[in-house]
Amino acid sequence: MLSNSRDKAIYRHKGHRKTCIKTLMGEVEFSRGVYEINDDEGKNYIYLFDEALNFNTIDLISTNLAEKIAENTCITSFKNASKNISTLTGQKISHTGVWNVTQRLGEKVAEQEKAMVDLYKSYKLHGEKELLFEESNGVFIKLQGKDRKKQKETAWK
């Protein structure tokens, strides 16, 4: 359906490619069509199937598996996280693969935060004020701003 309904002047069919996505339940293999786009930047390749299904994968790893990887890397090393994921899902993933997924997730978070900052700077972001709370555990936190002068005066008395 996607192949027949595409704009043939823009998208040139370049064949099918087999791919495999790793998920929590196992590997999912499928074939999808590759389309070439000629534009001002040169040749680019696109998968219309991915766009139609709105695939949101990290490399070839599903978001659910990437989430489990991220949870594991928060509590243990990349090597142990790869062992845990392999045991949990039966998927073979190296510690370097775990590191790569963590880096991609970090890049996505950075992009989202940059988009939020850009919205804020353009006055298009509306929301509620949040209260920030800082907890210290026996450590002296220097005061800033107006309260700093009062703190210095009381410290010398």
Image (spheres, helix red, strand yellow):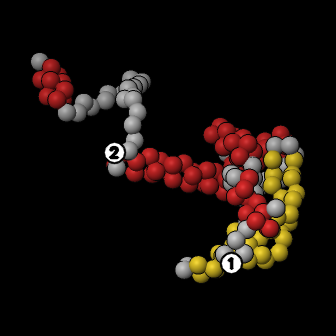
Disc 2, SS: loop
Are there few (<14), some (14-19), or many (20+) residues within 10 Å of tag 2?
few
Task: Please name the amino acid that badge 1 sits on.
Answer: Ala
In the displayed structure, would residue 24 be above or below residue 31?
A: above
Q: Quick one: quadrant of the N terminus?
A: bottom right
Q: Can residue 95 be seen by looking at this rendering?
A: no
Disc 1 vs disc 2: which is toward the camera?
1
CB within 8 Å, label 1 to label 2: no
| Mark sitting earlier along the chain (1/2) | 1
> Residue 89, position in %: x, y?
84, 43
> Residue 61, position in %: x, y?
75, 53
Task: Please name the amino acid that badge 2 sits on.
Answer: Tyr
Q: Residue at x 80, y 68 (%)?
A: 4
What is the C-alpha distance between the residues marked 1 and 2? 40 Å
> Residue 2, position in %: x, y?
78, 63
Are there few (<14), some (14-19), or many (20+) residues within 10 Å of tag 1?
few
In the displayed structure, would residue 62 be above or below residue 14?
A: above
Relative depth, front residue between 71 and 60: 60
> Residue 127, position in %: x, y?
40, 33
Disc 1, SS: loop
Q: Residue at x 19, y 26 (%)?
A: 147
Residue 123: which disc?
A: 2
Q: Residue at x 86, y 43 (%)?
A: 25
Q: Which residue is mark 1?
A: 9
Relative side of 56 to 132, left or right: right
